[in-house]
Amino acid sequence: MRHWWLAAGLSVAGSLAWAQPAWFTVVGDPLDKAADTVQVDPNRIAATPPAEGEAAPEKRLIEMNVRVNRSGPRFNWDRIPYRSYESRVVFDCHAKSATYVQARFYAEPLWRGEPHQVADYSAAPKPMRFLDMTPNPTARIVRAACRMRAS
């Protein structure tokens, strides 16, 4: 009996190691495909190492995954159609701004199916904005990400 509990415990621990991201819903409903929804993955936050000779740690950049579902079909700044997307965002806490450096765009709501477009914006990052979304969570996400970095 003791071995069964040990095996079960190891099985659960192993599945947790491979678990999906722990998405935190900032606005919307992740189960409602008709809702404008923004989620962040606070467990995958990463700070860039300080630049050589950098004295002010608040000037460092941090990265976090952000995913978005829109209530209807939309187009991004490159005229790529999408309904939902998953992205990697870089936060500049000193400038209080955030930019997309990578994104996977889905034609379906709620990140279903395969992404129909994958984009790398690392050479020309795009500003993180949630146009026509009320309440607009941009400033709230930037503040929260920068607070997490500081802790």
Image: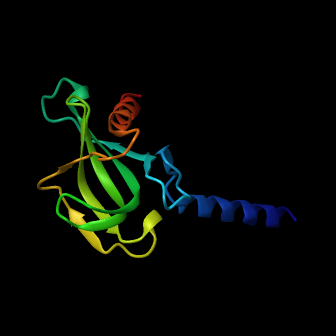
User: In x, y percent, where is residue 98?
Assistant: 25, 41
In the image, what residue occupies the spot 18% across and 57% down?
A: 77
The vertical placement of 116 against 65, above or below, is: below
In the image, what residue occupies the spot 46% across and 71% down?
A: 112
Left or right: 13, with 61 as reference point: right
User: In x, y percent, where is residue 42?
Assistant: 45, 44
In the image, what residue occupies the spot 48% across and 54% down?
A: 35
The vertical placement of 45 against 75, above or below, is: above
Quadrant of the snapshot with the C terminus: top left
* Viewer-nearest residue: 102 or 6: 102
Which residue occupies the extreme top position in the image?
55
Left or right: 22, with 66 as reference point: right
In the image, what residue occupies the spot 39% across and 76% down?
A: 114
User: In x, y percent, where is residue 39?
Assistant: 44, 49
Which residue occupies the extreme right position in the image?
1
* Viewer-nearest residue: 17 or 64: 64
